[in-house]
Image (spheres, helix red, strand yellow):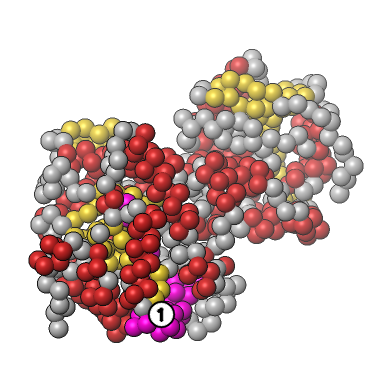
């Protein structure tokens, strides 16, 4: 099992009356940046990077950053900058950029170039994720959601070709046109850095990810729903005549590990509620603007009748498996159950949740590394891994 | 408001075009008139259509991606729609027509009349978008929740409450989102405008009537005023106590504003 430590880098200092959803319909897009205090921001960035570096020191297999725009939900408009900041301060973990929102970029070659640079800076520890960007980010960067998927597809094809084909070559596409594609540097990893793509149940995405043998990563959803996605991916792979190794499936979830079950639930509630009720407060007009999903996709979304995140109570979130909370034993058992049920080989854990303090984040990061991870390591690997956290 | 008009049951017809088909209504006798619908209201034969068809040979197609027309994804810009409709006129062997366009359809109508002035005898623009007015942008209807959009479209709050009192079916939600998705395809950026259109409007030769909604909360009045100012032979009339929905809110008054202008 591979364990990845995922940081969203939220801005936790929301106004006291933020629970007034009329006044603040979302922390994204229209939530004024007058609420961003640079003096706090500077400390947050350094604290959050310290937390990712600490995960590397503790033996997590991967550390994860991602991309969001114009939001207190996550402060990484450019995940590549965060990956660069981590590249020379870490040495063991893979660095997963999950991912670059390639439809939002006017110039996807810039992504090909930056990721190739990161591959060298990390000495080949880079995993390159590609995402479409959430609906609201298409407002934020003025990209038509109706073009989002075809821009994603073409940008992906272009980037991959730029990484794997000797240049110069021409790219004359629907959205992008270049007479000379010839990126320096080429990536270090051959044929290119591993690619991971998140999916939320779209059959087209499942088939495409399976065709390309990429890592399929889940997003926030009840376990029973994630099960259908992972089964769909395996089915798509089977139709193509292969069986994907478990590492090609990554289950992503917030996880709160405390000293005991009771203490964990007592401590976790406020932070889990921050994440789902404040961070993820967003109406359908923000998540899914016109054209972002196909008519068929919309129909199945509506038919599923899933409640918005803000409509789920803490207990419902725990029950549906949208967050893992417990003491070390319970967390170990739960992960074992989920692995058996879902068949994933990578676990991408959001351990810093919402407005958690630095101290609590550090404790949970360490508890998980020492109390849970060894349990899932093969004995050989365990012996070769320094078990103790650096002081 | 006279809502007494009972629309006849007019069946939509289908025409093979490009990678798919378009759906259109055609009814009535007299001068052929092409009606280009607004972002909403595709696929419906409503009282406004009925009133127009009593005075003219009305051709009312659904835009590609709207209503009962296929997506025709190869058409990605309003410029493409201009050629699409010129092809349609050729298909129907119509040398010259009267042209009426509402809101988004008003933009397409203005572009058509700029492109081929000789094909259009008279032009009516109902609350048209299409001009770039940085200091008075069209409201961002893409970011509106459906109830907010309905409230913005209609001036008569009784109509708003009536519309919102009925829970939409899944099919209706999907259809509305598909229409808005097609609108996003043609008008996300530049936002429902062509920066070059205004300085080309002088090419229009058809006598033109621009109809503004008295209480338009989507398209600021200045858009209608600038159309009327830049088109050589144009007049501006205002339908009072009416929101941007125009023919959806006051079909009789708006039909009257159209038919009186087109008659002669």
Residue A156 in the image: x percent, y percent?
29, 42
Determine the secondary structure under disc 1: helix
Pointer 1 residue = A261
Q: Which residues are magenta?
A: A249-278
- Is residue A264 one of those drawn in magenta? yes
Main secondary structure along the magenta-highlighted residues: helix
Q: Residue at x 44, y 80 (%)?
A: A265
Point out the residue furthest to the right here: B4
Query: What chain letter is assigned to the residue under label 1?
Result: A
Q: Residue at x 48, y 32 (%)?
A: B73
Q: Nearer the viewer, residue B251 or B109?
A: B251
Q: Residue at x 47, y 67 (%)?
A: A280
Tell me if residue B132 can be seen. Answer: no
Left or right side of A300 for B126: right
Point out the residue furthest to the top here: B93
Residue A258 in the image: x percent, y percent?
35, 80
């Amino acid at each position: 099992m591979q364990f990845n430590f995922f940081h969203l880098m939220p801005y936790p200092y929301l106004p006291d009356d933020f629970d007034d959803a009329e006044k603040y319909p979302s922390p994204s897009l229209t939530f004024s940046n007058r609420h961003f205090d640079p003096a706090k921001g500077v400390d947050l960035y350094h604290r959050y990077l310290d937390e990712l570096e600490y995960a590397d020191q503790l033996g997590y297999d991967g550390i994860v950053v991602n991309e969001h725009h114009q939001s207190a939900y996550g402060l990484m408009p450019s995940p590549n900058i965060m990956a660069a900041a981590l590249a020379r301060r870490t040495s063991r973990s893979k660095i997963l950029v999950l991912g670059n929102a390639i439809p939002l970029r006017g110039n996807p070659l810039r992504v090909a170039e930056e990721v190739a640079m990161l591959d060298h800076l990390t000495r080949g520890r880079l995993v390159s994720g590609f995402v479409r960007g959430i609906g609201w980010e298409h407002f934020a960067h003025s990209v038509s959601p109706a073009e989002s998927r075809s821009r994603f597809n073409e940008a992906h094809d272009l980037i991959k070709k730029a990484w794997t084909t000797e240049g110069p070559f021409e790219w004359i596409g629907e959205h992008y046109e270049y007479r000379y594609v010839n990126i320096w540097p080429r990536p270090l990893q051959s044929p290119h850095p591993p690619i991971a793509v998140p999916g939320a149940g779209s059959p087209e995405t499942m088939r495409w990810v399976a065709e390309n043998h990429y890592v399929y990563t889940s997003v926030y959803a009840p376990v029973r729903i994630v099960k259908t996605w992972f089964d769909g991916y395996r089915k798509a792979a089977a139709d193509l005549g292969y069986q994907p190794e478990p590492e090609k499936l990554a289950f992503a979830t917030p996880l709160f590990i405390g000293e005991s079950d009771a203490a964990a639930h007592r401590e976790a509630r406020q932070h889990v509620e921050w994440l789902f009720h404040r961070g993820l407060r967003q109406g359908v007009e923000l998540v899914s603007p016109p054209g972002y999903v196909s008519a068929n996709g919309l129909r199945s979304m509506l038919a599923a009748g899933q409640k918005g995140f803000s409509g789920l109570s803490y207990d419902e979130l725990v029950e549906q498996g949208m967050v893992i909370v417990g003491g070390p034993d319970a967390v170990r058992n739960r992960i074992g159950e989920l692995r058996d049920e879902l068949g994933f080989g990578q676990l991408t854990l959001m351990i810093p949740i919402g407005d958690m303090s630095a101290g609590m984040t550090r404790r949970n990061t360490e508890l998980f590394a020492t109390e849970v991870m060894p349990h899932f390591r093969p004995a050989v690997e365990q012996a070769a891994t320094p078990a103790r956290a650096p002081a | 408001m006279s809502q007494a008009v009972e629309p006849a049951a007019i069946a939509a017809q289908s025409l093979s075009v490009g990678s798919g088909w378009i759906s259109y209504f055609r009814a009535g006798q007299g001068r052929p008139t092409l009606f280009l619908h607004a972002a909403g209201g595709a696929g419906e034969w409503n009282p406004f259509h009925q009133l127009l068809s009593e005075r003219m040979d009305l051709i009312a197609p659904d835009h590609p991606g709207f209503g009962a027309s296929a997506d025709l994804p190869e058409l990605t810009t309003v410029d493409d729609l201009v050629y699409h409709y010129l092809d349609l006129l050729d298909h129907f062997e119509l040398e010259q027509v009267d042209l009426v366009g509402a809101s988004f359809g008003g933009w397409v109508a203005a572009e058509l009349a700029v492109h081929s002035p000789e094909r259009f005898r008279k032009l009516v623009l109902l609350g048209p978008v299409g001009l770039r007015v940085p200091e008075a942008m069209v409201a961002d209807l893409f970011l509106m929740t459906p109830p907010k959009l309905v409230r913005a479209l209609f001036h008569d709050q009784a109509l708003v409450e009536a519309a919102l009192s009925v829970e939409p079916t899944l099919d209706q939600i999907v259809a509305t989102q598909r229409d808005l998705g097609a609108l996003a395809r043609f008008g996300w950026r530049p936002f429902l405008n062509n920066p070059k259109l205004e300085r080309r409007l002088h090419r229009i030769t058809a006598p033109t009537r621009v109809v503004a909604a008295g209480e338009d909360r989507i398209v600021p009045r200045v858009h209608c005023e600038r159309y009327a100012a830049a088109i050589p032979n144009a007049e501006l009339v205002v339908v009072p106590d009416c929101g941007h929905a125009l023919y959806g809110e006051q079909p009789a008054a708006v039909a009257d504003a159209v038919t009186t202008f087109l008659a002669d």
